Image (tube, rainbow, N blue to C red):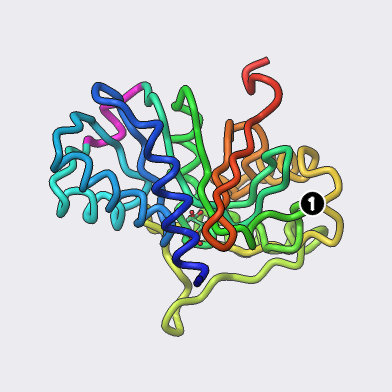
C-alpha cells in the first residue's frame, strides 16, 4: 500500500464528518485533493454544502467537480475545515505549508468551528521540528526578514523554476529550520512579531482532530481540551 493510498484513506474517513448545510473549508495539497474528490462524489449524490478554499488550486478542483465554492472574503464563519499536514504530534501541534498555502489555511482554520488534519501516518512524529517551518514574507521586506530569521532558524528562500516561489497572494516563502523547536509557542510568537512576516506554518491551537492512515488503518486523534479554553 502506497503513501498516496493512505492519504486517500485518511481523507475518506474525515469526510464522514461532513453534513448537508455545512460551510466546509477545503485544504490544499495532495491529501486535501483526495478529500475534495471524495466531497465531489458526495455532492453528486446529493450532499448540499457550501465551501471556501484555501488555495486557487483547491478552488479550481472543487469547482470542476461541481462543488459550490465561495470567496472567503464573504464568509465570516466556517463549520468544518479539512486540510493536510506536514508534521503532527499527538497533542495536535502541527506544521503545515509545504504547499505554500499556510496563510490562507491559517485564516480559514481560525474561522472554523472545527478543524481536522488528514495525512498518511509518516507525518505523525513524537515532536514537531524536523520539517522546515514555512514563513510567508512580504517581498519588500525580504532582506530584513531573512537577517532576523537567520538568528534562530536557518532560513532558505523557496525557489520554483529558478525564480523565488510566489504564493497565491504573490508573497515569498522562506522555509525555516529551527535548531530547537522544543517550545513551538515561543517560536510562533517570535515569527509573528517580525515586521514583514505575514504568517507561518506552525498550527499550534487550530487543529481539533487528525485522521492518520498507515497501511490502510486510520487512526483518529482528538484534541483533549477545547482549543478555545
Ligand atoms: C499546503 C499544506 C499541505 O496541506 C501540506 O503540505 C500537506 O500536503 P500533502 O497532503 O501534499 O502532503 O500545508 O500549504
The residue drawn where x is 79% and y is 51% is: 127
149, above or below 185, in the image: below
User: Is residue 194 located in the magenta-colored stretch of the structure?
Assistant: no
The residue drawn where x is 58% and y is 35% is: 209
Count of numbered circles in the view: 1
> Residue 124: x and y, percent?
68, 54
User: Is ligand 1 less than 8 Å from the beta carbon at label 1?
Assistant: no
Which image quadrant is residue 136 in?
Answer: bottom right
Which image quadrant is residue 82 in?
Answer: top left
Locate the C terminus and report the quarter of the image it occupies.
top right
The residue drawn where x is 76% and y is 67% is: 154
Q: Which residues are magenta?
A: 70-76
> Residue 95: x and y, percent?
63, 51
> Residue 135: x and y, percent?
60, 55
Q: Which residue is mark 1?
A: 127
Which element is circle 1 on? loop
182, above or below 221, in the image: below
Q: Is residue 100 left or right of residue 62?
A: right
Mark 1 neighbour density, 10 Å: few (under 14) some (14–19) many (20 or more): some
Q: Residue furthest top?
A: 229
The residue drawn where x is 50% and y is 72% is: 2
Q: Is residue 215 left or right of residue 72?
A: right
> Residue 157: x and y, percent?
59, 70
Amino acid at each position: 500500500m502506497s503513501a498516496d493510498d493512505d492519504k486517500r484513506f485518511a481523507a475518506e474517513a474525515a469526510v464522514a464528518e461532513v453534513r448537508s448545510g455545512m460551510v466546509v473549508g477545503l485544504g490544499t495539497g495532495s491529501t486535501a485533493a483526495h478529500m475534495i474528490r471524495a466531497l465531489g462524489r458526495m455532492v453528486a449524490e446529493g450532499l448540499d454544502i457550501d465551501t471556501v478554499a484555501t488555495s486557487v488550486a483547491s478552488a479550481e478542483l472543487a469547482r470542476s467537480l461541481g462543488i459550490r465554492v465561495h470567496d472567503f472574503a464573504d464568509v465570516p464563519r466556517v463549520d468544518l475545515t479539512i486540510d493536510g499536514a506536514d508534521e503532527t504530534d499527538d497533542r495536535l501541534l502541527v506544521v503545515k505549508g509545504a504547499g505554500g498555502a499556510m496563510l490562507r489555511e491559517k485564516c480559514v482554520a481560525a474561522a472554523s468551528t472545527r478543524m481536522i488534519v488528514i495525512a498518511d501516518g509518516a507525518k505523525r512524529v513524537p515532536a514537531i521540528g524536523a520539517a522546515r517551518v514555512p514563513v510567508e514574507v512580504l517581498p519588500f521586506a525580504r532582506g530584513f526578514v531573512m537577517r532576523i530569521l537567520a538568528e534562530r532558524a536557518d532560513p532558505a528562500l523557496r525557489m520554483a523554476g529558478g525564480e523565488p516561489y510566489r504564493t497565491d497572494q504573490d508573497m515569498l516563502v522562506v522555509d525555516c529550520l529551527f535548531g530547537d523547536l522544543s517550545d513551538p509557542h515561543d517560536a510562533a510568537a517570535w515569527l509573528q512579531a517580525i515586521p514583514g512576516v505575514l504568517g507561518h506554518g506552525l498550527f499550534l491551537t487550530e487543529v481539533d482532530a487528525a485522521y492518520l492512515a498507515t497501511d490502510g488503518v486510520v487512526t483518529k486523534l482528538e484534541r483533549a481540551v477545547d482549543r478555545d479554553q
